[in-house]
Image (cartoon, rainbow, N blue to C red):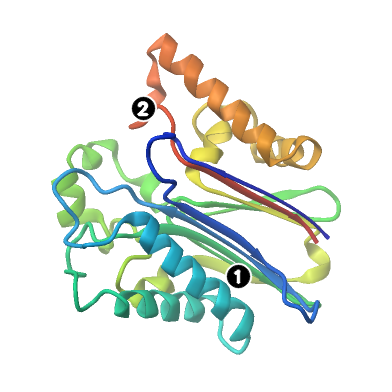
Amino acid sequence: MRTDLVSEPGDATRPNEDFAGVGLPASGQGGCVILLDGVTPPRGGSGCLHSVPWFTARLGGALTELTLSARDLTLPEVLARAIGRTADAHADTCDLSHPRTPQATAAVVRWSADTVEYLVLSDAVLLLRAPDGTVTPVLDDRLARLPRASLATDAFIDAHLRNKEGGFFTAAADPSVASRAVGGTLPRHEIGALAALSDGAARWTETFREGDWTALFDLLAKAGTRTLVDRVRQLETADREDRTFLGRAKTHDDATVVFVEL
């Protein structure tokens, strides 16, 4: 098994709001990948005393522990329990009903000797490569399918779209959103390798159109996660200098990639 992970903040003066980890139990049986992309709240407060990095660290830690130890639970059940555990950690001090309460997108994978289970919530990206080289993207594209006019103001998003029917869902304080995740289970022999990416790293394909998901996966397999993030940074810088911006709210975003050959 080979693993490769990089996580880099978009701004060196601000903390990285992503979380990523690979869990390999001492028994040697199975493992997991956890990737969270913290949602930067707009100005105006979140109703919470805690930062987004605090939230993603708490949720990521709970997900890692439960994914490995509670193998009787499905991944949606694991995510629901981890969200509930994290909410309990600050329910007494924070307004968890606030639409901007700390939240994150998620990609979770768990494998055993027989199966590979996976789950994606919001705009994190999961790529699964079969032994024959076929790459299958697992995407929760509800946010991408919303009309851009609907995303014009933060207030409209908060009131009508964020964790609402007809909008999009993130891991925040409501465990029930776990049932909205895109996921499934495949036989282990059908997956040779996988990659999980925050949207800041997925820009190579989604924003800059440097190649499709198969080309991105090939880049990771041959050159590594550090190379992908470096190339995204180069593209972001060139785009900023050209002042085209390609519809990006931030010039640089936190970028996280986990690559695993099973």
Quarter of the figure that contains the C terminus: bottom right
Q: Which mark is residue 184?
A: 1
Type of residue at label 2?
Gly
Query: Hey, which quadrant is residue 121 in on the image?
Result: bottom left
Type of residue at label 1?
Gly
The answer to whether residue 116 shows anywhere in this view is no
Indicate left or right for 151 with 199 as reference: left
x and y, in percent, of residue 13 in the image: 38, 35
Quarter of the figure that contains the N terminus: bottom right
Q: Front-most of 199 and 136?
A: 199
Indicate left or right for 20 with 1 as reference: left
The answer to whether residue 169 shows anywhere in this view is yes
Distance from Cα at disc 2 to Cα at disc 1: 32 Å
Other residues around mark 2 within 10 Å, as few (<14) / some (14–19) / many (≥20): few
Disc 1, SS? strand
x and y, in percent, of residue 179 in the image: 42, 74
Q: Which residue is drawn at 38% across and 46% down?
A: 145
Q: Which residue is drawn at 80% across and 64% down?
A: 190
Q: Front-most of 101 and 148?
A: 101
List the residue tagged with mark 2: 247
Kindly report which numbered mark, 2 or 1, lies closer to the viewer in this rendering.
2
x and y, in percent, of residue 224 in the image: 74, 39
Disc 2, SS? helix
